[in-house]
Amino acid sequence: MPDSTNQIAPTNVRTRFAPSPTGLMHVGGVRTALFAWLVARQAKGQFILRLEDTDKKREVAGSAEHLMNSLKALNLNYDEGPDIGGPFGPYRQSDRLDIYRSWAQRLIDSGRAYADPYTADELQDFRNQAKADKQAFLYRNHRPQNPPVWDGTTPLRFKSDPHAYAWHDAVMGSLSSGPEVIDDFILIKSDGYPTYNFAHIVDDAEMKITHVIRGQEFIASQPNYLNLYDALGLTYPVFATMPHIMGESGTKKLGKRDGAKDVLDYIHDGYIPEALINFIASLGWNDGTEQEVFTINELVEKFSLARVQRSGARFDEQRLLWLNGQQIRLLNIDDLEKRVANFWPEVAKSADNAYRRRVLELAQDRLKTLADLPALTSYFFSEPTVNRELITTNKQLAKLSSEEVSQLLGATADKLNTLADWNPESIQQALNALLDQTGTKPGILFSLVRIATTWAPFSPQLNDTLALLGRELTLSRLNLANQQSLQ
RNA sequence: GGUCUCAUCGUCUAACGGUUAGGACACCAGGUUUUCAUCCUGGCAACUCGGGUUCGAUUCCCGAUGAGAUCACCA
């Protein structure tokens, strides 16, 4: 059994992401792109984007742009691609028809390709017959004796040379198959466009791709590809097969039908690229340590195809949310400030920059997504709506009578009013003193003060919040809450 | 149905013949003389089953079961 001994150790690593523009980019596609990108960046090689738009019927307008925007939004920058060109272009398969034609001609000349003489109906009859005989359908069993000269109006088929293959896959390990899976597949369709099966091999060779990283759906076709590599006298690239990412139900390959959001949706919802990438990378990969949170650079440094999981993994949105919070906390404040530009609540847009920045510093620890910003900060910029349910449904505060609430708020206002300095330390001291003075538990007093000054379900540390809010606003809100508590 | 692949807590995973089977998310309970969705501590929770090989199997082999992929003029 031939092994993949003609597989070479690549010197200049070149990987590609080769999607077909037939829909939105979702996490499954992102992972394939990410891993190819990581392999290229780790080896200081090139990452190439190639659009496989050979099926004009299924093509969706705008999806090529969406694909490119998604990669850019995730900072998976490519070195060569349809919009930026490169030394091996064009990078759109529909612009490369002449190239496929000339490679096809080589196969015709060497007797390894022939015109398909059958009609669709005839072909269907062969299939039906095979099914009736309980046998797998193989086109090569019907290979015509004297095929007509190929004139480009009928499909061009590969004349296969079936035999068993064993090959190595960087993720899956040793793989093998028998000759029965190898068949005379179509190289060029009757519309003149090449099939994926043909075009990707031609392009990978022309573009000097060293690592073919793709989804599990291609593993069954791999022996056919090997047969074509052999017929073309090509050396094999490194193959790496990624298992699928499953939807939440865990039973199906993740797709649009599972309500899978595309990447740009996640970005719009306040997820940051670092989190998305960390999450997707760790969905089926780990470095063998107990590290969970990785920076992009750490990923580039530590990634290895050999450690990619061989079985499919489910998409767990809660883990992504957690990771997003972790990654947000890792950002320095200048960086965070740029990223939240479009997430500020309306009332914050006209606020003083320095003040807004200090609000952001406080909020950073609590953000799980950037979209949480308004809920977490709007009371810094405008008077919050009083919502007494926050008090009456609070399990600590519910026990207090309205008189007690009023007394506590009044005492707090009086105490804070006497402060000479208005800063987090002095405020904390004052509040602590107030605990002794009123004989109140921290959980009650601080909850009450927090709610009365923010009317938000959650907020940053109390003393920091009040310090930033300022004496005037703090006191006016305490007084307002006090009045309302007695109504 | 044929072919290929996979199989550890609910989920993502570590382990590469000997471990109280580790970590993380989620969940639960405490803590941080300051609330909370941050942070800290603790708890719950897994080797699909049956045969081998071995002094010893989650780990190696075989089988069963389950799951996924694929059998297009789609990629």
Image: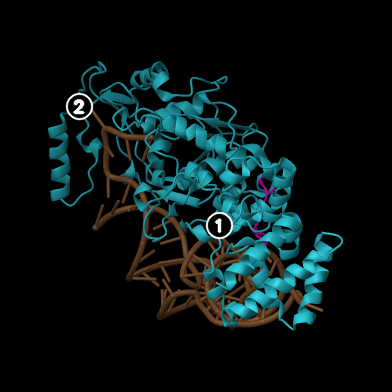
Chain colours: A cyan, B brown
The quadrant of the picture occupied by the N terminus of chain A is top left
- Kindly report the secondary structure that dominates the magenta region of the rendered protein: loop
Q: Position of residue A12 (x, y in %)?
A: 64, 31
Q: Which residues are magenta?
A: A288-298
Q: Amino acid at mark 2?
A: Gln
Quarter of the image where one finds residue A319: bottom right
Residue A145 tag number: 2
Q: Nearer the viewer, residue A402 or A300?
A: A402
Asked if the residue at tag 2 contacts the one at tag 1, i.e. Cβ–Cβ closer than 8 Å, the answer is: no
Q: Residue at x 41, y 36 (%)?
A: A225
Q: Amino acid at mark 1?
A: Leu
A100 over A58 or under it: above or below: above
Q: Is residue B60 left or right of residue A421?
A: left
Of marks 1 and 2, which one's residue comes earlier in the chain?
A: 2
Q: Of discs 1 and 2, which sits in the foreground?
A: 1
Residue A297 seen in the figure:
no
Q: Position of residue A472 (x, y in %)?
A: 73, 56
Q: Nearer the viewer, residue A21 or A216?
A: A21
Secondary structure beneath dot 1 equals: helix
Q: Residue at x 59, y 59 (%)?
A: A322
Magenta-colored stretch includes residue A338: no
Q: Position of residue A271 (x, y in %)?
A: 56, 49
Q: Position of residue B60 (x, y in %)?
A: 52, 66
A124 over A487 or under it: above or below: above
Q: Nearer the viewer, residue A131 or A318?
A: A318
